[in-house]
Amino acid sequence: MLWTASLCVLWASSVLGAPVNNEKQKVLLISFDGFRWDYDRDVDTPNLDQMAEDGVKALYVTPPYLTITSPTHFTLLTGRYIENHGVIHNMFFNTTTGEKKSYYQSQFVDQWWDNGTLPIWITAQRQGLKAGSLHFPGTASSYQGQFVMHKEVEPQLYNYKNETAWRENTDKVMSWFRDKNVNFVSFYFGEPDGTGHRYGPDSNERREMVKQVDRTVGYIRQSAERHGLTHRLNIIITSDHGMSTVYRNGLVEEITLSKIPGFSFGDLSFHLVDYGPSGMLSPKPGRLEAVYNALKGAHPHLHVYKKEDVPEHLRFTKNDRILPIILWADPGYVINGYFPVQFNKGEHGYDNQAMDMKPFFRAVGPAFHKNLKVGPFETVNIYPLMCHILGIEPEVNDGHLDATKHMLVTSTAARAESSSHRKYMKNAFTGLAAVAGFLVIVFAAAVVQRLLKQKRKTKRSGSLRDLPEKEDAHQTPF
């Protein structure tokens, strides 16, 4: 019986304890801001091509609307549409006071980011993993009082183009994985977005920046190998949105709200315009219909909706932060307020169904198939994919693992735990506790049995010593 119990312990230790080890898979999420899905078509990109051969390439992915930086990046971290996670703009604003903060300043406003939805950093840390983030939007803020464990926020007026800094940051991230045993890192690059804005997506400058991105992708993979991470690290590279060429120089009739008959900024209590092809308005009490009717149909390339009537595919309605009137322009146009103040040659923020707004996607690592090309999917689905590989239980989200599981080596495990780390640890301890309890019972039973046997033997020996000598062959035995 003891021999059988020992075998049970060995079995339980090997089966229940096997996944609880230091070889747990890691995930690196990288965003190259503004990298449109087709940017590799007019540029030689050997490293991105090699990554596709060694892993997975999607035709394109679809970001959520509003297609601007902070909201779409927070979708990558949470798997939620923008109306559900609440980071609805690059800028923090207060409609009561009229206060607006820049993109950089807004990174430090906790209540703008921390409004009920947890990013993957915090979820992973709460389930026993270690997380880090370098320059990723949302990194500077805390969530329910908790920061990402290892973080670096870029300084103000940071030079996002510096290729030397890109390599230094890459090695820093890889050292987090190796030396600090971090499980998940989000890593942000501000290009080719800046170059696309300034020079346009069809410019030679943009093509040169894509070459720099490609060189960096090669360096990232080399650094992972140098740090001994290739067999454990899964690298996912994507973006927040694409980029579209802006029509200028009198080629089109520009959209300028102040020139629209019947519209007046005096009817507004707050507005967000002059920030690209999208805008939001808050009319004064009793002026909503007047504002809406003046703008609706005023320009053939301007879309105007009351908040509750926004098309369902945009999923940009169900949040108190969204203002009563939503505006967006067709690709190539921007929305000006009093007069044109925007001079970018490239813009984003358009309808997420526009092909120019689609980002790219690559993934490589032990969890992923090799040389696999897949069809389009929404970026909300990247979050449950990452949670699955990490072996953590995701928060409530709008994504589905079914949309991406065909990329994985197996559809259920992908060499990661088939259940969450928390559940597995609980089951493991429960199983070991049961085996331990069984052993205690077996040991107690064995001891009792041995004592009873010894007692009977002793009693029998004593009884035989008390019997008289046999007198004849006919005596009946006791």
Image: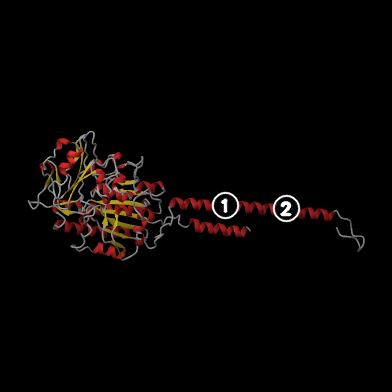
The residue at 72%/53% (across/down) is 452
Q: Name the residue under label 2.
A: 452
Seen in the image, is 44 located left or right of residue 234? left
Dot 2: element = helix
Give coordinates of residue 52: x percent, y percent. 28, 63
Asked if residue 373 is positioned above or below residue 113 in the image, the reply reads: below
The residue at 34%/58% (across/down) is 403
Amino acid of disc 2? Leu
Give coordinates of residue 44: x percent, y percent. 20, 64
Q: Nearer the viewer, residue 199 or 406?
A: 406
Q: What's the CA distance linking mark 2 and mark 1?
A: 24 Å
Q: Which of marks 2 and 1 is nearer the N terminus?
A: 1
Q: Quadrant of residue 49?
A: bottom left
Q: Mark 1 points at which residue?
A: 436
Amino acid of disc 1? Ala
Residue 227 in view (yes/no): no
Within 10 angstroms of label 1, few (less than 14), some, or many (20 or more) residues? some
